[in-house]
Image (tube, rainbow, N blue to C red):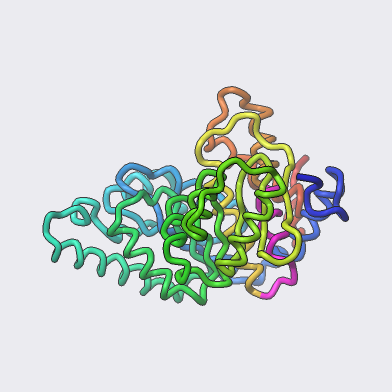
C-alpha cells in the first residue's frame, strides 16, 4: 500500500508526528473552564438481544478519547446488561425485540414509531451519533434507523457494522457529515450495493480506487478497516494507517475505533482545521497503539476489554494534554 499518512510522513516517526499534529489540531486542551458534556456528548444506536458488548466498547472508546457523556439507545433486552457493565453509561431502551417480531403489523409499526420518536427527540442534545455496533439485522429496527438518519443529517455520524448495510442500500441516508467504517467483508457488500457489481479478487491499488469510488458516490468519508486501514473522502489520495497493532484479533477492536473516531469526528466538525481522512487515520492509529500495548502484556489471553485499559495511555502518548495548575503530570 505504500507509506501511511502519505509520502510526507514516511517511516514510523513521521507517521506518529502526523498523528500527533492531527490530534493536537482536533482535540481541545484540558482547561478546567468547560461545563459537563461540552467536551463531547455521543449517542450510540446499537446493541440487541444477542449483542451487548459492541455498544459498550464503542462507548468506552468515546469516553477514553475525551467525550464526557455517552447515551446508548438499545433494545429492552440489552438495556439491563449494558447498565450493569458500567455506571458511566446512560442507557435508554427504545424498543422491544419481541414486539418488533410480533405477528401483528399494527404492533410492529407502533414499535418502529416509538423507537424513532425516542431517539429523534434526543438528537438536539448530541454532538455526534454512532449507528450500528451490535445492532443486528432486524428489518424493522433497520427501518427505524433509516428514519432516524434522515433526521440526523445535520449531525456528525459514524456508521459502523450492520448499519453499513442499511445505508448501502439507501445512499440518500448519508450526508457529507458521515463517515462509514466497514471492515473488508462489509466493504465488499457495500461496494456491491452501491455499484451493483461484485469486487472479486482485487489488488491493493484496485482496493484503494474502490474505496475512493464508494466515497465519491456516497459523498462521505469511508474508512475500510484491514491490515492497512484506508481512509478516503473521494478526492485526494487516500490516507493510510498501517501502524503495528495487536497480533491477536479479538472481536470488539472495531467498536473501539467507532467510539474513538466519534470523539475526534465531533471535534473535527466543530471547526478544527484538519483533513477528514487524517482525522480518521489518527483514530485508527490510536486504537492500533492501544491494541499493541495491550497485546504486549496479555499476549494469547488478550480480549477486547483489555484494550480499554490502554486507550487513555495511547491518547496521552500521541497527544499529551495540557497540565492545568495543580494537575500532576502523567506518570511514565
The foreground one among 196 and 229 is 196
The foreground one among 318 and 239 is 239
Check the image and report above or below for 62 versus 310. Answer: below
Q: Can residue 140 be seen in this view?
A: yes
From the image, which quarter does the C terminus lie in?
Answer: top right
Check the image and report above or below for 232 versus 116. Answer: above
Residue that lies at the very extreme toward the front in this rendered image? 197
What x and y, as percent, mark residue 301? 56, 24
What x and y, as percent, mark residue 240? 73, 51
- Tell me which segment is drawn in magenta: 271-286
Number of numbered discs overlaid on the protein picture: 0
Which residue lies at the image location 68% right of the left edge and 43% below the top edge?
A: 203
Is 273 part of what is drawn in magenta?
A: yes
Check the image and report above or below for 279 versus 242. Answer: below
Is 11 part of what is drawn in magenta?
A: no
What x and y, as percent, mark residue 24? 76, 61
Which residue lies at the image location 61% right of the left edge and 54% below the top edge?
A: 223
User: In this rendering, would 169 be left or right of 198?
Assistant: left
- Main SS category, magenta section: helix
Residue that lies at the very extreme toward the top in this rendered image? 300
What x and y, as percent, mark residue 296? 68, 28
Amino acid at each position: 500500500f505504500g507509506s501511511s499518512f502519505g509520502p510526507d510522513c514516511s517511516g514510523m516517526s513521521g507517521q506518529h508526528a502526523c498523528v500527533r499534529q492531527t490530534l493536537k489540531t482536533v482535540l481541545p486542551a484540558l482547561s478546567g473552564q468547560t461545563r459537563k458534556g461540552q467536551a463531547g456528548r455521543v449517542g450510540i444506536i446499537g446493541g440487541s438481544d444477542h449483542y451487548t458488548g459492541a455498544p459498550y466498547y464503542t462507548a468506552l472508546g468515546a469516553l477514553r478519547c475525551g467525550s464526557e457523556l455517552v447515551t446508548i439507545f438499545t433494545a429492552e433486552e440489552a438495556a439491563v446488561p449494558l447498565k450493569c457493565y458500567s455506571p458511566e453509561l446512560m442507557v435508554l431502551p427504545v424498543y422491544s425485540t419481541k414486539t418488533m417480531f410480533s405477528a401483528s403489523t399494527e404492533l410492529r409499526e407502533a414499535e418502529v414509531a416509538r423507537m424513532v420518536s425516542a431517539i429523534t427527540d434526543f438528537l438536539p442534545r448530541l454532538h455526534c451519533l454512532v449507528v450500528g455496533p451490535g445492532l443486528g439485522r432486524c428489518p424493522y429496527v433497520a427501518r427505524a434507523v433509516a428514519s432516524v438518519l434522515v433526521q440526523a443529517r445535520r449531525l456528525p455520524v459514524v456508521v459502523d457494522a450492520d448499519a453499513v448495510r442499511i445505508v448501502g442500500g439507501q445512499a440518500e441516508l448519508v450526508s457529507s457529515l458521515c463517515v462509514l467504517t466497514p471492515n473488508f467483508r462489509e466493504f465488499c457488500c457495500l461496494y456491491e450495493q452501491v455499484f451493483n457489481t461484485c469486487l472479486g479478487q482485487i489488488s491493493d491499488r484496485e482496493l484503494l480506487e474502490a474505496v475512493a469510488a464508494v466515497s465519491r458516490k456516497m459523498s462521505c468519508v469511508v474508512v475500510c478497516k484491514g491490515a492497512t486501514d484506508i481512509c478516503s473522502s473521494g478526492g485526494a489520495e487516500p490516507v493510510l494507517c498501517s501502524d503495528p497493532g495487536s497480533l491477536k484479533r479479538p472481536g470488539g477492536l472495531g467498536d473501539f475505533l467507532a467510539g474513538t473516531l466519534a470523539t475526534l469526528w465531533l471535534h473535527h466538525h466543530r471547526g478544527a482545521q484538519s483533513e477528514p481522512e487524517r482525522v480518521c487515520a489518527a483514530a485508527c492509529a490510536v486504537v492500533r497503539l492501544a491494541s499493541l500495548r495491550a497485546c504486549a502484556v496479555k499476549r494469547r489471553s488478550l480480549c477486547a476489554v483489555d484494550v480499554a485499559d490502554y486507550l487513555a495511555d495511547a491518547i496521552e502518548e500521541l497527544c499529551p494534554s495540557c497540565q492545568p495548575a495543580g494537575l500532576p503530570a502523567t506518570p511514565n
